[in-house]
Amino acid sequence: MNGISPEIGAKLPEFELDVFAYPVKVQLTPDVTKDELCKFPPFELWINTLKKSFDHQASRPRHPFHDKPYRLCGIRILSVSRFGARLGFVHLHADIRNEENKELPGAVFLRGGTVAVLPILRPRDSVDERWVVMTLQARVPAGSLSFMEIPAGMTDDDKDMGKSGIKAAQEMKEETGLEIRRDELIDLTGLALQDALAPESKHLERAMYPSPGGCDEFMRLYLWEKEMDRQEIEDLKGRLTGLRTQKEMIEIRLCRYEELWREGTRDAKTLAAWALYEGLKRAGKL
Amino acid sequence: MSSFTLPHSSPSCSVKLTPDLSQDQLLSFPAFQNWISTLQHSLSQQKSKDHAFYSSPYQLRSIDIQSVDFFGGGRLGFVKLKADISNDDGEKLPGSVFLRGGSVGMLLIIQPDDEPEGADGEKYVILTLQPRIPAGSLSMVELPAGMLDDSGTFSGGAAKEIKEETGLEVPESQLVDLTKLALEDVDQKSGERLQNATYSSPGGSDEFLPLFLHQRRMPRSQIQELQGKLTGLRDDGEKITLKIVPLNELWREGARDAKTLSALALYQGLKLKGKL
């Protein structure tokens, strides 16, 4: 794109970002301002994370790109989507190259952090029996009107991990009707990555990245495991199963724990939560 | 801004393009073709009396292309669009889609040939390390991802690096399709025709990855040599490099990567069921 707005033939608005050691030109679309973009939490977080990664090139002599570091040469905002007035998604292209003009893939879909909960119910009268609360909902990007997943949602504040736990509890209540307390949630990704001290990735989120090749999304996976009287679970089953809240359009199913990985094969976060839960259990951390 | 009517759409669906995207380019974009046909088929299932939306079915009314991004060679890479999918009561489904198509993930396990085949104790997994700008990282640990070329062989940057550094090449005959195997006995009650693959983020993107397994036995000394070689490799400016981790540590080493955890889950699940 040559910086000319296709609609009116006028030059697209641009500004200089001063987060890096050098100015970075950012080209906007007519429907977003510099202020909105810079205050968009996912953009802020992405830029700061990128800067830290780029700084390592110079600060660490053994960094593979130390001799020929990559630079952020420019950013082009391609389009934005809003939830009401608030920015929701930003599609951009980052121009990243080194002195030999070697490029790094710069297609980026910015949407920020998400949370998911692995909700496991255990009947009190059994040692091993476990049920997982799953959601079924329309997922247009997957072309489905009935996609099975563990409960999940978006966070509004990416920087505060404490808030994402609260958000997880909120999502659970909205999607399943189950009341869960923040302190009943165990941060599986946080636990798994506790000892992940590799310097090149220490500054990344303690979260799972569903698609790091195209999207900034990072997802904190929480465990909620609750012992209940069998009758309570049966009642829940009756109450939740097949219930469709008009507003949320989410159907709830209970899935046997042993079947979770198969029922959830198409959902990366379901499989990931299961792998982390099993791994942490085996390591004695749960 | 030009627009056209989506072929074979009922009701008629108008598609609004951006100036840098032609009707032809969009209609021949495999990701778009696949997404549209999957969606249209799912929507058609509403005709069935026991479908949840039978009484007030949703319809694809229009598509608004918001932006596109091309790969270096001029090939269409990513499309951000908004689909208007609503019923006659005015209820809408979230229609923001980041369209990019699928790729494949490869769980590459190597084992010293002096170990019993079935034992997981001394198995190792080959992972990739590469810049992932969307994650803000110049060094992301991931499951090797790529494509299956026309002959069904694992190909792409990761495959190339793996072949260069380990000599391993993975033809179709030596691949086990984990996702297909896992879904074998699962009843697709909805009648939908989704991919036999893992969807990385179905709330925002069409991206799907069939996950494959390839296990190779080799002399213990060769594995040790590989470990030594790969540790020293990241110094020469290579964009993509490899890392070897014990299978038992994969859940922790790969905890940031959805594909790694997904492939591990399927591997462990299928082993439990005796299917591997």
Image: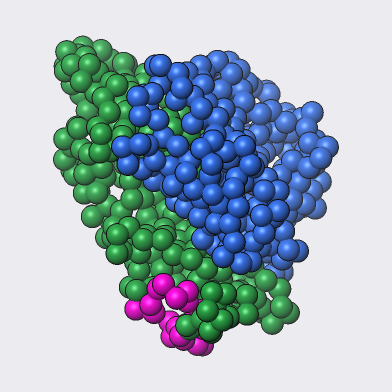
> Closer to the camera, A31 or A229?
A31
Give the percent coordinates (x, y) of residue A136. Answer: 37, 30
Residue drawn at x 44%, y 32% is A145
Tell how many labels.
Answer: 0
Q: Horizontal placement of B236 versus A217: left or right?
A: right
Give the percent coordinates (x, y) of residue A46. Answer: 44, 67
Residue drawn at x 45%, y 37% is B59
Q: Horizontal placement of A236 versus B229: left or right?
A: left
Identify the image quadrant of the C terminus of chain A: top left
Give the percent coordinates (x, y) of residue A252. Answer: 31, 26
Task: Point out the stretch of residues depicted in magenta.
Answer: A15-35
| The stretch drawn in magenta includes residue A18 | yes
Residue A206 falls in which quadrant of the image? bottom left
Residue B258 appearing in the image: no
* Chain letter corresponding to the colour blue: B
Residue A77 appearing in the image: yes
Residue drawn at x 42%, y 53% is A218
Give the percent coordinates (x, y) of residue A27. Answer: 51, 79
Residue A192 falls in which quadrant of the image? top left
Q: Is residue B219 above or below residue A90?
A: above
Residue B239 falls in which quadrant of the image? bottom right
| The stretch drawn in magenta includes residue B66 | no
> Closer to the camera, B18 or B119?
B18
Colour pattern of the rendering: by chain
The color chain A is rendered in:
green
Q: Is residue A33 above or below residue A91?
A: below
Identify the image quadrant of the N terminus of chain A: bottom right
Residue drawn at x 56%, y 81% is A9
